[in-house]
Image: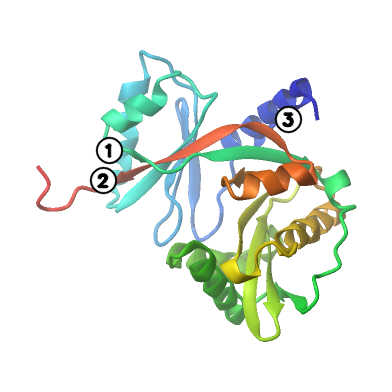
Amino acid sequence: MDLDELLKVRARFDAEVREGAQADGGGALVVRVGPVVRQSVPGPGWNGVLWSDLDAETADAQIAAQVGFFAERGCPDFEWKLYAHDRPADLGDRLRAAGFVPEPPETLMVGLVAELAQLPVDPPEGITLRVVTDEAGVDLMMEVHAGAFGSERPRIREALLSRLRDEPETVAAVVAMAGDVPVSAARMEMRPGAAFAGLWGGGTVPQWRGRGIYRLLVAHRARLAAELGIPYLQVDASDDSRPILERLGFGVMGVTVPYIWTRPGPDAD
């Protein structure tokens, strides 16, 4: 895709996935409050701001309003998902001034399903794919995440279990197995009628990297998206994933940075 086409796709992404966001399950509620779209959940899950349309006069008040909302609910933390093209241009600085801490930036990328579905899907030698449909499969994914990313992800586990139980049509998860050992895992999240499916959680344990497994999982999910009539795959790519995705044909739509607000502890000033 050339730059003009990428900008058009990004505008569609903003309108459908961010401003027109749907709740991601687990009792989550997405609402628009003036110039802000946010999601809140009653238990484990993702709380945060998905989209905003602010300016220099309204930004600080809206940031304070969202902090107040989530603090009043007792949330231990929430995320403001900032994109580089969001307004005002200094929104990141304003978030930091309000106590948010930025995590590493990610590259917002998009791929055409019609092209990605043509990638070869033959597994590397010794690898088989296991489709995740139950708690045992989710636990295999969490084992991969711990090995690939070096951290436990209990919120993702609970959210994925909730989706598989209540809305299985909105998620497709897969684990690459080397015999009985899980070595790579990934999921795809989508909504009926949506133009975009999101690729999430793609990771491979260090000793199995460089063998084409990540590419295999992208191709597997692209074929599923093609069967569902979804035209675009979207990824928030790490620095490790970006070059692989670019080689597969993904284009760059921009940069996104998760800004995290954490409830102050009892000893905070």
- In the image, what residue occupies the spot 45% across and 43% down? 104
Front of the two marks 3 and 2: 3
Which x, y percent locates residue 267?
A: 9, 51
Query: Between marks 3 and 2, how big is the CA–CA gap?
Result: 37 Å
Query: Nearer the N terminus, badge 3 or badge 2?
Result: 3
Query: Can the viewer see residue 132 in this picture?
Result: no
In this image, 34 relative to 24: left or right? left
Q: Nearer the viewer, residue 22 or 187?
A: 187
Query: Between marks 1 and 3, how big is the CA–CA gap?
Result: 34 Å
- In the image, what residue occupies the spot 64% across and 30% down? 15
Q: Which residue is mark 2?
A: 72
Label disc, if present, on residue 68 of the rendered structure: 1
Which x, y percent locates residue 14?
A: 62, 31
Q: Secondary structure at mark 2?
A: helix
Circles 2 and 1, Cβ within 8 Å, touching? The answer is yes
Q: Which residue is mark 3?
A: 9
